[in-house]
Each structure stands twice: as structure tokens, then as C-alpha cells.
Image (tube, grey):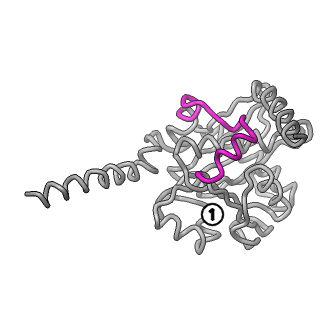
Amino acid sequence: MRTDNVFSSFSDRMSEVLARVEYRRADTVEEKHTIYRMRHEAYSRAGSITLQPLGLFTDPADEAPNTFLFAVYIDGEMASSIRVHVASRVEHCLPAASAYPDIIGPLLQSGACIVDATRQVSDLKFSQRYPQLPFITMRTVCVAEDYFLADYMVAACRVEHQAAFKRIFSAVAWSPARTYPLLAKPQALMAYESKRMRETVRSRFPFFNSSAEERRRMFERSSTSTENQYDAIVGWRAQQAQQSQREPASALVTSTA
């Protein structure tokens, strides 16, 4: 009972803060550079990267067609940022596939839809003021999970951050820390099985829920492409399902002819 009360109280506080939050997908060069500067400050402060000449931290995955860059604003000020990739084929960009190909590769080959959360950073002032900020920022992943009907959510993180993913999503470690591209510190891979754990997580943290309109607004297009991303990333799965439904009927007609 006490645990339920704690979660309820936390959810109430979260709802109060979320009323002042705006999720903005970064589509322009100016918006992206604002995020890259925040990244550079956060990662250099943590000793994860060396100082870059332009004060920007970016990589080729930022420009993939299935990249969603988000800035999170509280009361009109940028408080945090996160990068989301969604993939269901091996040809889709997924940062985790580069660092953990032995784990992610077979899933993509099977057609699983995976949401990969990377480059989660925050402004130091806001992270000190709002302990809920990691939840607010990671909420974007839940919106993506629902929009694309994902099978898994994965996130690479430093060892000391694994507990947070376990606490929020009941995530499990799929890989111990290993070398991760462009980062000085090894990263472990945390994973969450969406269809099995979704209801448990949402009942505990109902603020992770979203409306159809919010999902469409955030993920219908990406930060780099105006193409409908549901069709581009997982549309083939719906077509395959429809084909599978038609095939038994076709077989029946053939067998009775």
C-alpha cells in the first residue's frame, strides 16, 4: 500500500510539471545545433568526450532518415534533449546495432521493431531543480513505442545509470558494458520488452501514456525526412500481416477448385 501511495504521489507531481512541458522535434539546422551544444556541454562535463572545436557533439546517426531529435522545454526554456531511432530492418539506422551487433542484428533480421534511445542529456540547472527530468525526457520513448507498436526499447548507458532504467522500465541488462562509438566510457545495453511490460509500466507511471494526436505530431515525420515514418519503418509489417490473412483464403479456393 505504501508503495502504491508513493507512485501515486510521484505521478501527481509529474502531471503538474508535464502541464508546463513542451516536446519539440528539431527539424532545422538551428534547432539541431542548440541540441548539439547541450550535448557537448553535458558529455564533456561527464568526461565522456573531449572538447570539440565548435562546441558541438554530433555524429552521422543524427542525419539518418529515421532519426528523431527532441528538445524538452519547461516553461519555455530548454531543459533536456534525447535522440530516438526506430528500426525494423537491418538497413535502418540503429546506434545500438553498431555497438551490439550480435544482440541487435538477429532481432532486426527477424523484423522486430526496436526503439533506441540515445544522447539523453540535460541542462545542469534543470536537472538539479527537477528530479523528475529523466522521466519527462524518456517519455518520448514511450510515445514512440505506442506510435510504432514497438517490440523492444533499448538504451545504452553507463554502468551507474543501469539502476535508473531498471527502476523506470523494469529493464534488464542485455549486455555488460563494452566499448561504444565516440564515447570514452563503456556502455551497457539495457532493454525492455514492450508488449510484455507495457501495461505494468503504464499502470505504475500513467504519465507515460499519450494521445493519438501527440503521437502523430511527434513521430509522423522525422527530423530529417518529411516521409510518413510509420509507413517507412513498419508499414511493411502491416502489409505482410494482411498478406498472411489473405493466403489461407486463397489456399482454400485452390484446394476446392
Q: Position of residue 75 (x, y in %)?
A: 79, 25
Q: Residue at x 71, y 47 (%)?
A: 36
Kindly report the secondary structure that dominates the magenta region of the rendered protein.
helix
- Which quadrant holds residue 59? bottom right
Q: Which residue is mark 1?
A: 96
Side of 139 where 112 appears, left or right: left
**Residue at the spot 71% in from the left edge and 65% down from the top edge:** 189
Percent position of residue 235, x then y = 40, 48
Is 166 covered by the magenta stretch?
no
- x and y percentages locating residue 13 in the rendered image: 84, 30
Identified by mark 1, the residue type is: Ala
Per the image, label 1 sits on a secondary structure element best described as: helix
Residue 62 in sight here: no
Question: Magenta stretch: residue 215 in it?
Answer: yes
Q: Residues within 10 Å of mark 1 (few under 14, many from 20)?
A: many
Query: Would residue 13 appear left or right of 35 to someone viewing this image?
Result: right
Vertical placement of residue 95 versus 235, above or below: below
Q: Which residue shows up at 76% across the image and 39% down it?
A: 136
Q: Nearer the viewer, residue 253 or 100?
A: 253
| Residue at horizontal 91 percent and vertical 36 percent from the top | 129
Which quadrant of the figure has residue 26? top right
Image quarter where the C terminus lies is bottom left
The answer to which of 167 and 141 lies nearer the viewer is 167
- Range shown magenta: 195-216
Q: Position of residue 247 (x, y in %)?
A: 25, 56
